[in-house]
Amino acid sequence: RPYGHAAAPRLAAPGPGCDTAAMPPNRLPRPTVRFALPLLVLLLACLAQWTLALNPGYFSHDELQWGAAADVPPGMALPWFPWTDATMLQWRPLTFNAWLLLSSALFETPRAMHALWVLMGSSIAAGLAWLLLRMGLKARTAAMAGLLFALNPYAAYVHGWVATLADLLWVGASLALAAVLERAYRRGAIVPAAAWAFGLTALGLLAKEAALVMPGLVGLAWLLAGRPRVLAAATAASALAALAYLALRAGALLSPDASSGYSLAPAAAPKNFAAYAMYLPVTASFEVNTLWLRSHGQLVASALLMLGLALGVLRASPRLGLALALGAVVTVGPVLVLPQTATQYGYGFSLWLVACTALAWPKLGRPFRALVLLLSLLCTWHGVRVQHEMRAVGERQAVFQPALAQALAAHDGPLKLQRHRKFGWAYERLVHDVPSWRGQAIGDRVRWVEDAAEADYRIADDGRLVRP
């Protein structure tokens, strides 16, 4: 039965020239396929990210700071993040309290922590495949879309860095809302759609401010689906949650401390959006903030590839082309006005891009299918390179941090380290505002110098500290 519910509106036969690429199918795939496909994508995505899952160390100061915060004597309570003080800039009580709890349980076993992150990210990829399958894509196309999302460079960065729990949570909440609304749309269930939209938007906002994009995405779905009442109610409920959040948080969000790195720079928005879009096929760029250091040839080629993708989706389906363009802007909208870009901010952007491209795939002509395949190869290879870079830093951190703690314990006053030639940026992050490591105070005791003659130690290629 159409939509699987007797009381739901039936699909009319499309008239001449009707764009059917984004219309829901009359029949759902078999239950065995709906059950087996996400499990297969979950398994393959986890296996394809084994480099991240088995990482023996950490990437940056954020996870080390929370590890230090969770290192409390037996019997003492963890320093829980306040749920009611919404005046601080980064008020993410769900994320920070969950992160604190996970650090208490898993920080001393980095591989277990990383395996959990890979599992969460792979679950989002499996959920994307499941949703695309319900929206009418063939199982093979839906599975490949899920795997492509799991292996793109934005996902590799988020799945490999423990400091990205907020991004996993808000994007996961957004995908869960999309799945709920797809089912509610089929059944014509207005009240459940509104309730879930309010609840999941609130959940996403407790994880990260970026979830403010959720009402915009639901509203875009409402507009492009022909303005059905189910999605109208969901848009209103999601917007209500966002407005309540803004009523509590507008002062903190709109007047950030200039030293926080979150000051507002609206003039940077076009360049920032270009960076998030062009980063995907530029395989030599580890983080998005280094994109503009690449050669002009690489940048021009990347821009042409991404513009070609947008044109191909637009030709396949005007509605999907509009969804791709508007949704891409919405997913990174809140961070476009920041003065700098950050790779984890593109996580939801990459999911939206993959989903729209996958939905357009059945109607793409051969030239544009070839373009999508080329972009998929470039993005996957880029993701693999990001995975290996994350692993390289983690392997060095696992050696460097204990060596640093030992050197500090035997040294009075500041410790001078010679800046490492290749991974200097990583080692600087690993000591930035880190209060302690397994009980040994670090704080501001590390000084970086260029000349070996001034240094107490230099850092070997594997992270050991050796006398110069």
Image (cartoon, rainbow, N blue to C red):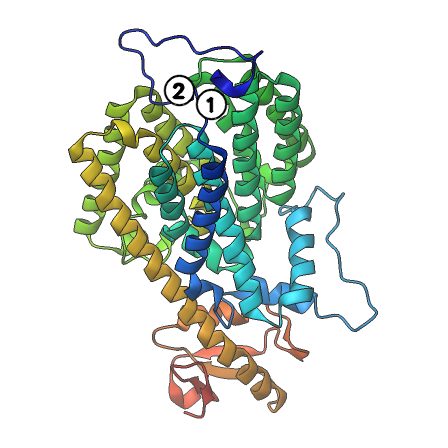
According to the image, label 1 marks what residue?
A: 221
> Mark 2 is on which residue type?
Met
**Which numbered disc flags the more N-terminal residue, 2 or 1?**
2
Three-letter code, disc 1: Ala
Where disc 1 sits, the SS reads: helix
Q: Residue at x 44, y 81 (%)?
A: 463
* Visible residue check, residue 342: no
Q: Determine whether label 2 and label 1 are within 8 Å by CB.
A: no
Depicted 76 relative to depicted 237: above or below: below
In this rendered view, identify the residue nearer to me: 255 or 242: 242
Q: Under tag 2, what secondary structure?
A: loop
- Residue furthest to the right: 75
Quadrant that contains the C terminus: bottom left
Of the numbered discs in the image, which one, if any, rests on residue 259?
Answer: none
- The percent coordinates of residue 33 (x first, y second) are 45, 38
Residues 219 and 256: in front is: 219
Q: What residue appears at the point 41 percent right and 30 percent down from the top-left corner?
A: 327
Q: Is residue 77 left or right of residue 358?
A: right
Residue in the picture at 45% in, 30% down: 134
Image x and y of residue 295, in percent:
20, 54
Q: Which residue in the protein does label 2 denote?
A: 23
Q: Nearer the viewer, residue 307 or 54?
A: 54
Horizontal side of 176 relative to 272 (left or right) equals: right
What percent of the width, then of the height, locates residue 421? 34, 76
Question: Which residue occupies the foreground of this view, 104 or 336?
Answer: 104
- Please say if 316 is above or below 111: above
- The percent position of residue 429, horizontal first and vertical second, equals 49, 67
**Nearer the viewer's eye, disc 2 or disc 1?**
2
